[in-house]
Amino acid sequence: MSGPKLPSPPSPAKAKLSAAERKSRQADRLTTIRLRMAIHRVLDDRGLSSPAEVGEALGLPAAAATGLLARHQWRDGDVALLQAAAARLGVTVSGAG
């Protein structure tokens, strides 16, 4: 028999972001949304839909390209990757950098 269940140790508190960091991340999120929409539009107009075609058009491996365009969670560095992909496609997005 085991003894009474002990409470688990408290999880380490997440570091709070400063107001400036939150504002910057929110701006990045909006930029990624705009870039993804514009990139999807161009890919759609060109009839590129398979992961291999998308990857080739963006200059990334197929899995990386589809992941970049499909992910919903913000990741540091996504804006730069999306801007590079957009530039490669000749996409211009206002308010995206």
Image (spheres, helix red, strand yellow):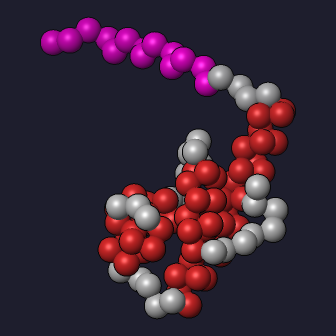
| Image position of 41 (left or right of 22) | left
The answer to which quarter of the image holds residue 84 is bottom right
Compared to residue 89, the image places residue 23 above or below, namely above
Q: Position of residue 67 (x, y in %)?
A: 43, 60
**Residue found at x 81% / y 42%:** 23
Q: Position of residue 30 (x, y in %)?
A: 74, 58
* Residue 78 in view: yes
What range of the chain is rendered magenta? 1-14
| Image position of 39 (left or right of 62) | right
Quarter of the image for the N terminus: give it.
top left
Task: Please count the marks in the image.
Answer: 0
Between residues 47 and 30, which one lies in front from this camera angle? 47
**Residue found at x 65% / y 23%:** 15
| Image position of 40 (left or right of 65) | right
* Residue 30 in view: no
Between residues 50 and 85, which one lies in front from this camera angle? 85
Q: Position of residue 90 (x, y in %)?
A: 63, 75
Compared to residue 84, the image places residue 20 above or below, namely above
Quarter of the image for the C terminus: give it.
bottom right
Residue sitting farthest toward the top: 3
**Residue found at x 34% / y 15%:** 5
Q: Position of residue 82 (x, y in %)?
A: 59, 59
Q: Main secondary structure of the magenta part?
A: loop
**Residue found at x 69% / y 54%:** 29
Per the image, is 2 magenta?
yes
Per the image, is 74 magenta?
no
